[in-house]
Image (tube, rainbow, N blue to C red):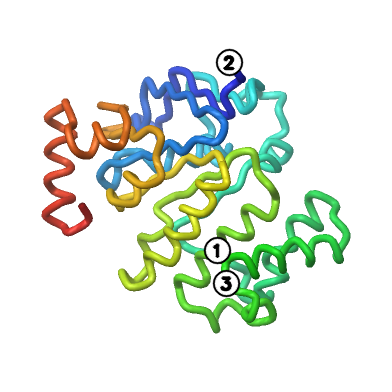
């Protein structure tokens, strides 16, 4: 069996006296998508930030392609070259065009030539139907278009692992599907992903494993069909009932 792209063992994270993640263990094989569901404040975003080394951890181990990236001697900037992350807010640079947003890191971090980076950006923009927006600034784009550009910017680095943190939560419901269809395409391409989402239908479509997180712990995990249609734990059932009542299931 090949080494998992991501492996987490007994991760613990706290802010002062408040424990926000505890006993998190997880294995993400290549070309799979692991989806975290749970209420706001359950620890989903913190977990993604720990994987991306934006937040330190108190205990446990995170391995990327078998390498312990929580080792204090590891250079976090080098680790992040292998990771793509898309946040709730689009975080595009407002003073740069769409193409410049996408090519900045490939040029500055990965050392690509400007021509090569532009070619890669245009290829992705064409593929995801945004070529005509290449020379526009972010404020001229819809929220859905901005989030799709943020995703393109992340995959332009050809990451080993893509982290997606509630990427539709800031969008008008009408714009949600265009963003989710982009992620579905990436899944079909074999991109390895860890996602946090409130969109249960989407989680069912793209996930290989769904994990329900509550109070910083994985309460239950399994296939999307089992987790969303036949959860075993009462806490998972209660959460999904609330999601259903909110119209997201």
Instruction: Tell me the mark number nearer the camera, choosing from 1 and 3.
Output: 3
Q: Which residue is mark 1?
A: 91
Residue for badge 3: 129
Q: CA distance from mark 2 to mark 3?
A: 37 Å
Mark 2 surroundings: few (<14), some (14-19) or many (≥20) residues within 10 A: few
The numbered mark, 1 or 3, whose residue comes first in the sequence reads: 1
Residue at image x 55%, y 36%? 31
Are the residues tagged 1 and 3 within 8 Å (C-beta)? no
The label on residue 176 is none
122 is higher (above) or lower (below) than 200 = below
Q: Nearer the viewer, residue 121 or 196?
A: 121
Q: Secondary structure at mark 2?
A: loop
Classify residue 37 by image quadrant. Answer: top left
Query: x, y percentage for residue 48?
Result: 47, 40
The residue sitting at 63% across, 53% down in the picture is 155
Residue neighbourhood size for the residue with mark 1, other residues' Cα within 10 Å, grouped as few (<14), some (14–19), many (≥20): few
First-in-chain label (2 vs 3): 2
In-image side of 53 versus 202 (left or right): right
**Image coords of residue 72 (percent x, y):** 66, 24
Counting other residues with Cα less than 10 Å from the Cα at mark 3, is it few (<14), some (14-19), or many (20 or more)? few
Query: Of helix, strand and loop, which one carries label 1?
Result: loop
Using the numbered discs, state the Cα–Cα distance from disc 1 to disc 3 in whole angstroms: 20 Å
Depth check, front residue: 113 or 46: 113
Position of 191 with respect to 97 (left or right) is: left
Q: How many marks?
A: 3
Question: Mark 3: which secondary structure?
Answer: loop
- CA gap between label 1 and label 2 equals 37 Å
Residue at (69% x, 81% y) in the render? 135
Residue 1, numbered label: 2
Q: Quadrant of the N terminus?
A: top right
């Amino acid at each position: 069996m090949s080494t998992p792209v991501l492996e987490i063992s007994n991760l613990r994270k706290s802010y002062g006296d408040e424990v926000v993640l505890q006993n998190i263990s997880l294995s993400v094989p290549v070309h799979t998508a692991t989806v975290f569901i749970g209420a706001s404040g359950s620890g989903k975003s913190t977990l993604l930030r720990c994987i991306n080394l934006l937040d330190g951890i108190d205990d446990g181990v995170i391995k990327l392609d078998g390498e312990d990236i929580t080792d204090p001697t590891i250079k976090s900037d080098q680790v992040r070259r292998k990771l793509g992350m898309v946040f709730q807010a689009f975080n595009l640079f407002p003073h740069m065009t769409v193409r410049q947003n996408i090519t900045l890191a490939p040029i500055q971090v990965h050392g690509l030539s400007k021509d090569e980076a532009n070619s890669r950006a245009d290829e992705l923009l064409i593929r995801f139907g945004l070529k005509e927006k290449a020379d526009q600034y972010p404020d001229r784009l819809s929220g859905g278009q901005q989030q799709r550009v943020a995703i393109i910017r992340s995959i332009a680095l050809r990451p080993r692992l893509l982290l997606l943190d509630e990427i539709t939560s800031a969008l008008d419901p009408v714009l949600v599907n265009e963003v989710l269809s982009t992620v579905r395409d990436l899944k079909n391409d074999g991109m390895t992903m860890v996602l946090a989402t409130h969109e249960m239908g989407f989680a069912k479509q793209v996930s290989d494993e769904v994990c329900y997180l509550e109070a910083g712990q994985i309460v239950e995990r399994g296939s999307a069909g089992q987790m969303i249609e036949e959860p075993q734990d009462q806490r998972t059932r209660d959460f999904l009932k609330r999601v259903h009542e909110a119209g997201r299931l």
